[in-house]
Amino acid sequence: MKGKLIIFSAPSGAGKTTIVRHLLGKGFNLKFSVSATSRAPRTTETHGKDYYFLAEPEFKERIAKNDFLEWEEVYAGIFYGTLKSEVERIREEGKNVIFDVDVIGGLNIKKYYGDEALAVFVQPPSVEELRKRLTARSTETEEKIAMRIAKAEHELSFAPQFDVVIVNDQLEEACVEVEKVLGNFLAN
């Protein structure tokens, strides 16, 4: 039996990656869908584990071949996308695919798979808290943080289009809530 799809989307810094990592250790038969990106890897990231890091020309070539389930130019010259082959490989193994994708990408995957997918929006408690979290990462310049905050304010408007909205104010509580939602989805 083919696996189901669980999509996590959120503004950068809302905690979706932390929640996804938490769920991977909870026995839901989940396998992470590794996204592709044209951005350079951060020092802590590994090709094939965190992302498939593709040079921009290769990314554009894969777009032209229709290799992506969804893709977006998130920032000028910086592309992110989900390879169809990655998703189908995981589903054919009978595992449930878990995604950590941007908001538009998440909605596109949900649209493509319909009821086979659960779309979860992780919402920060406030834009001010989001700014604090991004600053605390110490991975980006003030200019990049300002860019991410502007994008986050836009992304928050898409929350009502998701199946479930989880407010990540206290991480432990958000994780418990997500586990319940996921358990119900996978039981049906």
Image (cartoon, rainbow, N blue to C red):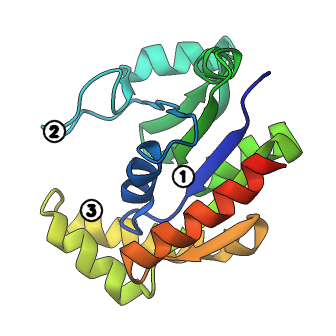
Per the image, label 3 sits on a secondary structure element best described as helix
**Amino acid under disc 3:** Lys
Q: Please tell me whether residue 143 is drawn above or below residue 86 in the rendered image.
A: below
Q: Marks 1 and 3, Cα distance to the nearest angstrom? A: 16 Å
Instruction: Please give the name of the residue rendered at 58% of the width and 30% of the height, measured from the top-left corner.
Output: 82
Mark 2 element type: loop
Image-based side of 1 in relation to 175, left or right: right
Residue 102's label in the rendered image is 1
**In this orientation, which residue lies closer to the viewer: 53 or 27?**
27
The residue pinned by badge 2 equals: 44
Secondary structure type for disc 1: loop
Label 3: few (<14), some (14–19) or many (≥20) C-alpha neighbours in 10 Å: few
Q: Which mark is residue 144?
A: 3
Q: Position of residue 69 (x, y in %)?
A: 69, 28
Q: Label 2: how many residues lie within 10 Å, few (<14), some (14-19) or many (20+)?
A: few
In this view, 80 is above or below 93: below
Residue 185 lies, in percent from the top left, at 76, 54
The residue depicted at 69 percent of the width and 39 percent of the height is 5
Using the image, determine if residue 155 lies above or below residue 106. below
Task: Kindly identify the amino acid type of the residue bearing the numbered disc 1.
Answer: Asp
- Which residue shows up at 48% across the image and 73% down it? 174
Label 1 Cα crowd, 10 Å radius (few <14 / some 14-19 / many 20+): many
**Contact (CB < 8 A) between labels 2 and 3?**
no
